Amino acid sequence: QRNGKAVPYLKAVPSKSIHTIQQLRLAGFSAVIDLGTMADVAALHRHETEALGMKYFNIPAEEDIPGKADVAQFREILSVRENLPILVFSASPDLLGGMWAIHRRGEGFAREDAVREGRRLGLSENGARDLKSDMQFQAQ
C-alpha cells in the first residue's frame, strides 16, 4: 500500500525490478504481510523480513474470501502508520483482491468502487460475484 492505494508489487517501485524483500527494504517498505501463504514459505518470509529489521505479519487465511478475523487483523495492521508502505504476499490473486475490496468497503467506499479496486489486484469475476453476494462484505 502506498498513499492509501494498493499497487501490485511489480509496479510499486517505478523503473525498478523488485525480486527480493531486501530490495523492497531499500525501496522504503517497512513491513510484509503474508496472506494465506503456505507455512513453509511464510517461515522463510518471516526470517528474511525480520533479519532486515522490517515488521512481519502473517494472516493465515484459508479461503479465497477472507473471514472477519482476517479482515480485522488486516485493517489493524494497515491502521498503524509505521507499518506503511507494506507489501502483501498472497496465496492467490482472488484472496488479495477480495481482502482489499472488503477493507475498502469497510473504509466507506461504495461497493462498486471497492470491487473495482479488488479487481485491479487480481480479484476474478467469480470472486467479485462471491463478494457481492456475501453477507460479510455488506457488514464490513
Image (cartoon, helix red, strand yellow):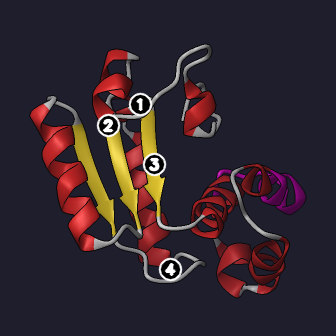
Q: Which residues are drawn in magenta?
A: 106-116
Which quarter shows the C terminus?
bottom right
Q: Position of residue 56 (x, y in %)?
A: 24, 47
Which quarter shows the N terminus?
top right
Q: Position of residue 134 (x, y in %)?
A: 73, 85
Q: Residue furthest right?
A: 112
Front label number (2 vs 1): 2
Name which residue type carries label 1. Leu
The answer to whether residue 83 is left or right of residue 63 is left
> Which label belongs to residue 84?
1
Q: Position of residue 85 (x, y in %)?
A: 44, 29
Marks 2 & 1, CB-CB < 8 Å contact: yes
Marks 1 & 3, CB-CB < 8 Å contact: no
Secondary structure mostly seen in the magenta stretch: helix
Mark 2, residue position: 31
- Identify the secondary structure beneath mark 2: strand
Name which residue type carries label 3. Val
Q: Is residue 67 magenta?
A: no
Name which residue type carries label 4. Gly
Mark 4, residue position: 67
